[in-house]
Amino acid sequence: MISSRFFDLLHSGKPVVLDGATGTNLQARGLPTGTPSDVWVLDNPAEVIRLHHDFITAGAEVILTNTFGSSRLHLAHAGLDARFEETNRTAVALARQAAAGSEVLVAGSLGPLGEMLEPAGTLSAETAAQVYAEQARLLAEAGVDLLVIETQFDLNEALAAVRGVKSVTDLPLVCSFSYDRGTRTMMGLRPAQAAQALAGAGLAAIGINCGRSLEDNRRALDELRAATDLPIWFKPNAGLPHSDAEGRMIYDVTPAMMGEQVAGWVAGGAVLVGGCCGTSPEHLRAIAEAVRKVA
Amino acid sequence: MDEKLKAIYQCIVEGDNNGVQEHVRAALESGMDAGTILNEGLIAGMAEVGRLFEEGEYFVPEMLISARAMKSAMAILKPHLTSEQVGFAGRVAIGTVKGDLHDIGKNLVGLMLEGAGFQVIDLGSDVAPEKFVEAAKNNDVDIVAMSALLTTTMVNMKSTIAALEEAGVREKVKVMIGGAPVTEAYARQIGADGYAPDASRAVALAKSLLS
Ligand code: B1M
């Protein structure tokens, strides 16, 4: 069941507007620090829908489910594995509800498992692939339009993730990395290496999300563009945060500052654009307006 | 620098696990003082690894490989350290707080504390407040040491201190904290006894807390 709606959007010749941050915004809306944002899918669904809605109003054409940390393994770390099936299904339903009556697509978010794979860690690639497959199957069954493996840093994990997801669904798949050590991931992976390793994997797009500063992400984009023919997904953080004495993250990049960058992203080859940590609905509105201007 | 120390230092920087064990054994056999091997070979090497990581020359895999080499070298060195001038400095229960799986920094701090004569009880990572309390109660622990790498788990340092208070053991122990997002101001705010920005300063802090 290939969703042609995503491919239509992707090949419309216009940049596609994605959404902004989930965690940072839910925290601003009362999610206690220390509580994973996925918890609100079941505990405060109204606020999750409201955030999706705010992104749609701001101009998002694709929204991501609040399932970044909802792999069985990640939930188990928080003692929440009993919620696995329900939280993934419900998260899709909430996004669908927010998108109802619009053309907005729902992308199922799959985040890192939170453990290191062999040889750096102890998790086998086989297990990792199964864990991704299991979550992807649930999200696909619940009706997402595409799947996004995001914030990846370890090529072994990303390859296992793609293999796992591909084993259970034909939905369009995006794989996106976080280059948070400048233009390298924390494992030292470069955009060109990721692009090369995933060239034959059947991805709909390859991406960059989270990372460090807007400048670093921009440099990563240039490196990635030079190394791939795939459409590029680009969802940088709203700049580099710093934390205050309470441990709250502070983002200094304003919506206007982020909006100013967008023409450069599109010129630099980004086709799907949005924001990661720190990107509020106001930031996203600035991004969407800038996209409309370049289109 | 002495050739033997230089070789040990180099093995740590390069993460040469077999090499470092060989060189540490050879240095001990030649009669070199274990404290010198630790400070000028191993710790100096790990400090360089930390610098290379900060500079973006090293990434997590290199860091892990060097930390493993440091660990096996410490295992060889430990019996010699305790029998020498480095006397018993105190007992520390160390762990990464609940919800947090980052243990590279915590392990380094633990290793350095051992090197300085502390007996270290490693509670691991993702350690619940109750587990810290249990350790503080049962083991004659002098210091409870907590590490956190996530802004979302830092708050569990505060809940652990609250749990220690509730269990009536807060006054029995000193509490020290560290990890990338943690600051001196945060330590003061949550009522910890001290904060250290890196492993060598963690050793200095632990010593000063017990003096
Ligand atoms: C008691 O007294 C003391 C005193 C001093 C103490 C002390 C205690 N503890 C430490 N110190 C001090 O001494 C040490 C030596 O000098 C120092 O320890 P450090 O721990 O600071 O330094 C170490 C020697 C080296 N540094 C490290 O080991 C951390 C490196 C980075 C790259 C990192 C790693 C390695 C990992 N990670 Co994670 N990781 C990142 C880190 C980014 C970065 N570039 O720093 C960080 C910390 N991670 C982050 C994130 C978000 C995550 N990670 C995750 C997972 C992982 C891995 C498992 C892949 C791996 C950990 C492996 C392991 N076994 O530890 C996930 C969470 C898992 C979990 N529940 O814990 C996940 C949520 C990723 C995800 N999206 O799923 C970010 C945190 C953001 C934030 N501020 O909250 C992060 C800054 C990366 C980023 N740029 O976004 C001092 O702080």
Image (cartoon, rainbow, N blue to C red):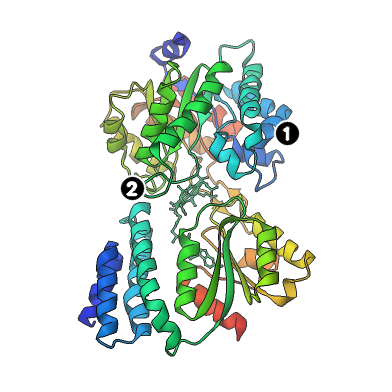
Q: Which numbered disc covers residue A188? A: 2
Q: Secondary structure at mark 1?
A: helix
Query: Residue at 23% of width from left, 73% of height from top?
Result: B7
For the C terminus of chain B, the image quarter is: bottom right
Q: Which numbered disc covers residue A70? A: none
Left or right of B37, for residue A42: right
Whether residue A95 is situated above or below residue B99 in the rendered picture: above
For the N terminus of chain B, the image quarter is: bottom left
Q: Earlier in the sequence, mark 2 or mark 1?
A: 1
Chain letter of the residue carrying label 2: A
Instruction: Provide the residue designation for mark 1.
Output: A43
* Residue A210 percent across, percent down from the top left: 47, 39
The verdict on a common chain for dots 2 and 1 is yes
* Residue B141 percent across, percent down from the top left: 64, 75
* Residue A179 percent across, percent down from the top left: 39, 42
Whether residue A291 is situated above or below residue A253 in the rendered picture: above
User: Residue placed farthest to the left in the image?
Assistant: B3
Query: Residue at 76% of width from left, 67% of height from top?
Result: B165
Label 2 CB-ligand 1 distance < 8 A? no
Chain letter of the residue carrying label 1: A
Q: Nearer the viewer, residue A279 or A177?
A: A177
What's the amino acid at mark 2? Gly
Q: Quadrant of residue B135?
A: bottom right
Left or right of B9, for residue A16: right
Q: Nearer the viewer, residue B105 or A9?
A: B105
Query: Residue at 41% of width from left, 44% of height from top?
Result: A117
Q: Quadrant of residue B122?
A: bottom right
